Amino acid sequence: MEMSERSQITEAEVGISAYVSPDIAGFVGRFKDRWQDFHVHEIDLNGVELHLSELLSPGAVAAELQAVKTARREARAALGPDFVLEPAVEAELQVALGGPLVSQLLGFLRQQGKNCTAKEGDGGLSSESGPPPYVDLDAAAPDDGSKEARKRAHRAILSSFGSFLNTETLEGEGGSRVIRVWMRDAELKLKSSITASRER
């Protein structure tokens, strides 16, 4: 569409059918006609204009992703029978989950090892010659069992272990809710195998 054609569009064509103050005369002009009109200046809460201070090269991004992978592997490798929670992490989990659920989560993490091979079992999920792929925590136990309490529980778990754990709230047996804490790699394998078997 040529520039002259675009400037010929009427108010009715773009949905304008009335004016707030029809007695005030309008004005003629172009509104957001050039690419420069869409240039955005980010301004923080103190009124300071923000500017791009660093451009990341693809190599820098790849190096950062590799560092994240390495950290995830190291954190995952620390799991096992001798695994202990750092005091600050334990304190955060105690507030969000309460003592019994922290003990249950710690027991689950101590069961994890390098040879976690999970598969779909009869009527549910089970592990084969390895640790369980998930643990179900009673969702009514944290604080008052409210949705906000469950959110705090999810956040506390993921803030410390999000590189290798994942959480979701599910309906358990008898309609009670559970917070399912998954080993991320096992969850991916199991859920993708379930999806693949349903597609066949």
Image (spheres, rainbow, N blue to C red):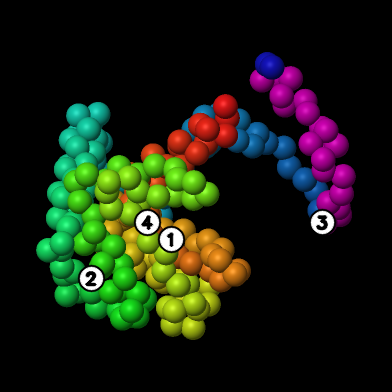
Q: Point out the tag, 3 or 4, that comes first from the N-terminus.
A: 3
Q: Which residue is mark 3?
A: 20
From this viewpoint, which residue is outermost toward the bottom? 144
Residue 180 percent location from the top left of the image: 43, 61
Numbered badge on residue 89? 2
Q: Is residue 167 magenta?
A: no
As measured in the structure, the alpha-carbon distance from the residue carrying label 3 to the one carrying label 2 is 58 Å
Query: Is residue 45 at all visible to an observer of this figure?
Result: no
Numbered badge on residue 180? 1
As measured in the structure, the alpha-carbon distance from the residue carrying label 3 to the one carrying label 4 is 60 Å
Q: Which of the two marks, 2 or 1, is nearer to us in this view?
A: 1
Q: Which of the two marks, 2 or 4, is nearer to us in this view?
A: 4
The structure residue drawn at horizontal position 72% and vertical position 26%, both measured from the top left corner, is: 7
Numbered badge on residue 134? 4
In the image, residue 180 sits, relative to residue 187, either above or below, namely: below
Is the stretch drawn in magenta largely helix, strand or loop? loop
Residue 171: quarter of image? bottom right
Query: Is residue 189 at all visible to an observer of this figure?
Result: yes
Residue 38 percent location from the top left of the image: 52, 37
Which element carries disc 2, helix, strand or loop?
A: helix
Which element carries disc 1, helix, strand or loop?
A: strand
Left or right of residue 6: residue 158 = left
Q: Which of the two marks, 3 or 2, is nearer to us in this view?
A: 2
Q: Nearer the viewer, residue 73 or 44?
A: 73
Q: Do labels 2 and 4 touch, CB within 8 Å?
A: no
Q: Residues within 10 Å of mark 3 (few under 14, many from 20)?
A: few
